[in-house]
Image (spheres, helix red, strand yellow):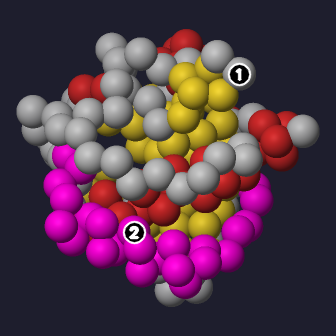
Amino acid sequence: MQKIKIPESLKKQTWDFVSSNNMGNRFDFNGSKEQQYAGLIGENIIRKAFGYEYSFETGYDGGYDILHNNARIDVKTMTRTVNPKGHYVNNFVGYQKELPCDIYIFCSLNKRTGFLWVCGFTTKERLLKEANFFEKGTIRKRDDGTTLTTEAPLYEIKNNQLFSPLILFI
């Protein structure tokens, strides 16, 4: 996993943007402002790592965030209050499985430290084959003993099932 400090200017610009723009365009489970903020932070950190400028565009993105070397890449970012571990899962909402995408990059944003962790990546085909699938309404138990009821059909893939993010940028 790769740990990256989020620039203060990006935090401010992103919060200002999501405060005045709704980026959720699905028929259900569009994400809160905080979730949209985390997603846009993750997307822009990855965008910069590939050598592109930050992007703050409204409207439907076509199912992916970045087109790089003809690969359609979607960045998925979760917020946490702790640093990610190998057995922690990344969520992929089943409503998005038909969207045109080739690669998913999974990130965790630690709200307490202000660091983004690039956890790894996988292909769409591999994600749908190897991730655990849970129907909407399934009760999931977390490490800390708390539970969560899935609000959408959900795929979960562990960090230790992902490819190292370092090979993305070589």
Residue nearest the viewer, comparing 27 with 71: 71
- Say whether residue 13 is left or right of residue 107: left
Residue 75 visible at all: yes
Q: Where residue 163 sits: x, y (%)?
A: 75, 35
What's under tag 1, amino acid-wise? Asn
Q: Disc 1 versus disc 2: distance between alpha carbons?
A: 26 Å
Image quarter hosting the C terminus: top right
The numbered disc on residue 14 is 2
Name above or below for residue 17 compared with residue 92.
below
Q: Where residue 17 sits: x, y (%)?
A: 30, 66
What's under tag 2, amino acid-wise? Thr
Residue nearest the viewer, comparing 118 with 81: 118
Q: Which residue is mark 1?
A: 69
* Residue at the far left in the pictured view: 27
- Under circle 2, the secondary element is helix
Residue nearest the viewer, comparing 112 with 135: 112
Residue under the point 40% across and 37% down: 92
Name above or below for residue 84 compared with residue 72.
below
Image quarter hosting the N terminus: bottom right
- Under circle 1, the secondary element is loop
Q: Quadrant of residue 37?
A: bottom left
Report the span colored magenta: 1-24
Residue 150 visible at all: no
The numbered disc on residue 51 is none
- Say whether residue 40 is left or right of residue 43: left
Q: Where residue 73 sits: x, y (%)?
A: 56, 30
Residue under the point 70% across and 69% down: 4
- Say whether residue 61 is left or right of residue 170: left
| Of pointers 1 and 2, the one earlier in the residue sequence | 2
> Crowdedness of circle 1 by 10 Å Cα count: few (<14), some, many (20+)?
few
Name above or below for residue 30 compared with residue 101.
below
